[in-house]
């Protein structure tokens, strides 16, 4: 497993995306958005290219302004109500556990209620720092979620490693000045522009050392 330049770095903190990185919520997401799209006269193709973007941002991109408020409320309602089948992705629980004595966070495009619902459904033990779209002025692909997570951790963003599955999330991480590790769980590998790309978190391990955190191939 080639981690490129990441193998030579020691990071102050690791910041994880949630959906598609730590948990598999894809079936629930598809069900909610398919129903929402049907109700609003849209198709899946109309929603394409927005993976990793906060739901409110998707709504604003595909509907006229006078429909935004009600449509945002509706997709939030649908997503919170459907958590069936959500589960932890391979290596995610182990990654978070290994960082219990280091600096780690989740930065998600979910709202606070949705993040709580999905974390509970997956029975995931999250780090103490959780940044949602409700905590920032701008969600991904803007850098704000990762900058806020770094701030709360007391870490320099340029010394943080972001783990993401979505191109828009990787854009946000790079805009924040972070190193990037992509997992191929929801997006084809050729669409993931990151410092290193791995199948999932089971392919790596995190090691807390005296001056920070290192990421290593799982087989080392």
Image (cartoon, rainbow, N blue to C red):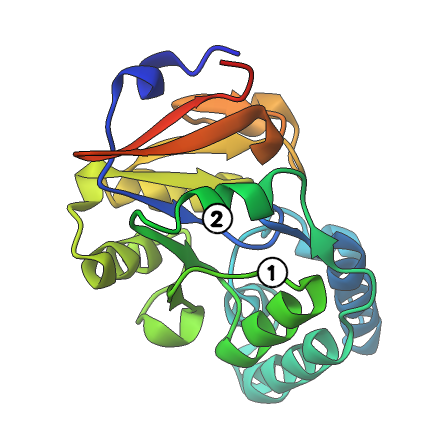
Please count the marks in the image. 2
Q: Is residue 8 shown above or below 150?
A: above
Residue 96 shows in the view: yes
In the rendered view, does 41 fall on the left or right side of 129?
right
Q: Residue at x 38, y 23 (%)?
A: 195
Circle 2 packing at 10 Å, graded few (<14), some (14-19), many (20+), is many
Q: Residue at x 47, y 60 (%)?
A: 108
Q: Residue at x 61, y 66 (%)?
A: 119
Element under disc 1: loop
| Tag 1–tag 2 contact (CB < 8 Å) | yes
The percent coordinates of residue 199 (x first, y second) are 63, 26
Element under disc 2: helix
Determine which residue is flagged by label 2. Answer: 96
In the rendered view, does 64 fall on the left or right side of 164?
right
Front residue of this view, candidates 162 and 214: 214
Instruction: Give how far apart the Cα atoms at labels 1 and 2 are.
Output: 9 Å
Residue 168 shows in the view: no
**Quadrant assignment, res 25:** bottom right
Determine which residue is flagged by label 1. Answer: 124
Q: Is residue 171 shown above or below 28?
A: above
Circle 1 packing at 10 Å, graded few (<14), some (14-19), many (20+), is some
Front residue of this view, candidates 184 and 153: 153
The percent coordinates of residue 153 (x first, y second) are 23, 57
Q: Is residue 216 shown above or below 49?
A: above
The percent coordinates of residue 35 (x first, y second) are 83, 71
Task: Specify which label sits upstream in the sequence, 1 or 2.
Answer: 2
The percent coordinates of residue 148 (x first, y second) are 26, 61
**Quadrant assignment, res 211:** top left
Name the disc covering residue 49, or none: none
Q: Residue at x 46, y 26 (%)?
A: 193
């Amino acid at each position: 497993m080639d981690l490129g330049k990441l193998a030579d770095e020691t990071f102050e903190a690791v910041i994880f995306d949630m959906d598609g990185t730590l948990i598999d919520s894809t079936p629930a997401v598809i069900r909610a958005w398919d129903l929402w799209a049907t109700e609003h006269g849209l198709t899946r193709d109309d929603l394409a290219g927005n993976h990793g973007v906060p739901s409110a941002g998707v709504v604003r991109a595909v509907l006229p302004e006078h429909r935004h408020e009600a449509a945002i409320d509706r997709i939030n309602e649908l997503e919170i109500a459907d958590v069936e089948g959500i589960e932890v992705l391979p290596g995610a629980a182990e990654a978070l556990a290994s960082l219990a004595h280091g600096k780690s966070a989740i930065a998600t495009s979910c709202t606070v209620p949705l993040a709580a619902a999905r974390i509970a459904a997956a029975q995931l033990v999250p780090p103490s720092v959780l940044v949602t779209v409700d905590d920032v002025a701008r969600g991904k692909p803007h850098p704000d979620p990762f900058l806020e997570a770094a701030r709360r951790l007391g870490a320099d963003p340029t010394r943080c490693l972001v783990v993401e599955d979505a191109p828009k999330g990787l854009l946000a991480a790079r805009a924040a000045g972070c190193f990037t590790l992509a997992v191929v769980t929801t997006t084809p590998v050729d669409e993931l522009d990151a410092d290193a790309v791995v199948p999932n978190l089971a392919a790596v391990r995190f090691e807390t050392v005296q001056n920070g955190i290192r990421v290593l191939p799982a087989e080392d």
